[in-house]
Every structure is written in C-alpha cells, then in structure tokens.
Amino acid sequence: MGSDHDADRSSGSPSTPDLEIRRATHDDYDDVRSFTEGIWTDRGGDYLPDVYHDWIEGEGGVEAGETPKKTFVADLEGTVVGIVQAVLLSSDEAWLQGMRVDPAHRRKGVSWRLNEACFEWCREREATLARLMVFSWNAAGLGVSRAIGAEPITEVRWVHPDPDSDAEGPLPVSSDPTAAWRHWTHSEARDELRGLGLDLEQSWALREVTRADLERQADEAAVFAVEGDDGLSGMAYRSRVYERSSGGGDDEHGDDGDGQDDAGSAEPTTWAEYGVAAWDDVDAARSLFAAISRDAAVVGADETRVMIPETVGYVSDASYAGVEIGDEPAFVLGVDLAGTQ
C-alpha cells in the first residue's frame, strides 16, 4: 500500500466535511501529480505520476476479464487531495495500494475516508479480508496502516539470483505442479507467509496460493519442485515476466513495492518475477535458485525478483546459496472486513 503520512488518529472519524470521495478519472492527473511528485525523492520518487493513466480503471470500470478494481480520490471543492486503489484478487481477498494524501491535508481524516470507501467496495464484492504492503523504511505508512485497523500478517524479503543458462545445483528439479503443491502445503515457508504468494496478474499484490495457480503456471509459465534425497525439498513458481524502465522507484532495484512498476528512464529492463520460493535446506535452496536462474535466462530476463519469507533462516540460506539479498523487507498487513463495519 505504501501509505503516505495521513491519519486522523485522535478521533478515528472524518474531519473535513466538504470532502467528496469518488472514482478517479483521467482528468484528475494534474492534481495527483502535483501532490505526489515530491514524495520519496530520496528513493527515486513516486511511480504514480508515471503510470497514472494505465493504473486507474476506465470511466466505465474494468473491462470483462480484467481484475476488478476501483480507484478512489478525495475531492475537496474541486481539487483532488488524496488517492487510493482497491483490487479484488480472488472471491474473498482484496488488496489496497497507492494511498497518497496531499501534504497540506494530512491528519484531517482524508485517508480514513478513502479507506472506508475501499472497505465498502470490497465488502460489496464479498471480500472478507483486505491486505496491503508497506516497506519497512516507511514508518509513517506502517502507523497509518495500523490506524485504519490493519493487523500484522507476515514479512517478506526479495532476493535476486542472476539469470544464467548454465547455473547448476546439487539436486534435480522437476516442473511437476503436483509435487510443487505437495511441498508447499507442508513447508515452513507456507506457515511463515500464511499461505501467501504473489498474484499472477496484479503486480506487487499477495494472495493465497492455490493448487490451480501452480497447475496454471506449469502450463503458462514455470513451476519448480526440488527432489531431495529424502523426498521433495523445495518449490517455486514464476508469476510473470515484465518490462520497466530503469531508474526511479523505492526499493533496492527501483520498484516501488506498492502496486505498479516504475517508468523512470528510457532504458527497458526485463524482469522475471517468482511468486514465492520455499525450501528445506541450503542444498535445496541452491538447486532452486539455479533452476530459477536458468528459467530467467530462457525468458530473456535481465533481472529477477523472488519472494521469500523474512526469517533469519530463509534469508541466511539465500545468502549462503550465493544470491543477492534485497536491502529492505516488506510488511504485509490485513484488515478483517467483517470486523470493520
């Protein structure tokens, strides 16, 4: 979600009576750009001005077959002073992202009103839980997330094995989705992540991994199952391949961590993204990362991004296996929509 510094923590209620919460339009771009262009300048700036027109849904809502979403703005007497987006990821899981509030209107209940609109939209679509992500460096965003009722769920880290068609590991790796699912259901990683992995359509969003996801990715992308000496010992899946321009963004590789990929400079970089990686020991980790490196090379990726649990075991295993570790973890929080009415 990457919330930007706004909460009416004293009363928990709106304090700007003239505020209108409505659907975002393309005509709101100039207002949104004006209050977001100065955000996170020390981390490459905010992605929203670059992706705004593609990020929001059309005037008539999403097209058939697209992921349901709605982007809300807070309109104060004709000027937009806040924005947020809600996305429906499954039949009962929603994702909140892109919360921004004009610095001149923080602590006036703007984020409270925007989130209430998101919660109502999600409930109308029978979602029971709305999750969001905040990077660990965004202390204000963490505070705002707790203020709106979000509770901690899990913590993740990104790792970045190099694409390499010749990468090798000590254990064999298959592409069997049934084997990958079997390992996932019994893995410590699944417990640590509360069953979550990256969504297959929506960037930076997490939802529960299903067996159908792995079967689909085995057909359309890539799935990995590590075969250890004593049985299955690791799994992963490729969630998507995408291009973005180099530079800008907020994490150690220029992405914002908040819903869309940055469009900074003109030089495109191809990324292969892997929705989760789980393993039992360092040999399994080495074998899994080698398979990911080979796969990334096959799809022509320049960079990779793999989500793992943020625990000392998994992070140190990844380092021991020789892959690059992201500088900052990210926190995932969730709002019980049945309990916030």
Image (cartoon, helix red, strand yellow):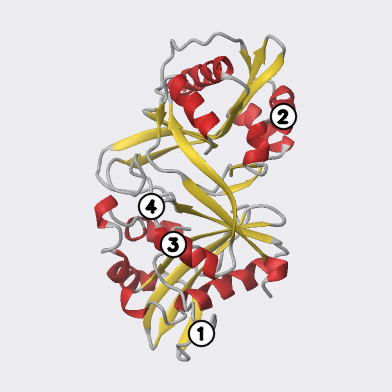
Front label number (1 vs 2): 1
Q: Which residue is the site of mark 1?
A: 14
Residue type highlighted by circle 3? Gly
User: Which of the two discs, 1 and 3, labels the residue nearer the N terminus?
Assistant: 1
- Mark closer to the observer (2, 3): 3
Sequence-wise, which precedes: disc 4 or disc 2?
Answer: 4
**Could you tell me how far apart the alpha carbons at marks 1 and 4 are, in whole angstroms?**
27 Å
Local packing at callout 1 (Cα closer than 10 Å; few below 14, some 14-19, many 20+) is: some
Residue tagged by mark 4?
137
Mark 1 vs mark 4, foreground winner is 4
Is 253 placed above or below 17 here?
above
Q: Secondary structure at mark 1?
A: loop
Vertical position of residue 158 compared to residue 103: above or below: above
In the figure, residue 151 lies in which quadrant? bottom right
**Helix, strand or loop under label 4:** loop
Say which residue label 3 marks.
141
* Labels 1 & 4 near each other (Cβ < 8 A): no
Mark 3 surroundings: few (<14), some (14-19) or many (≥20) residues within 10 A = many
- Marks 4/2 in contact by CB < 8 Å: the verdict is no
Question: Residue 92 location in percent, x, y?
Answer: 71, 57
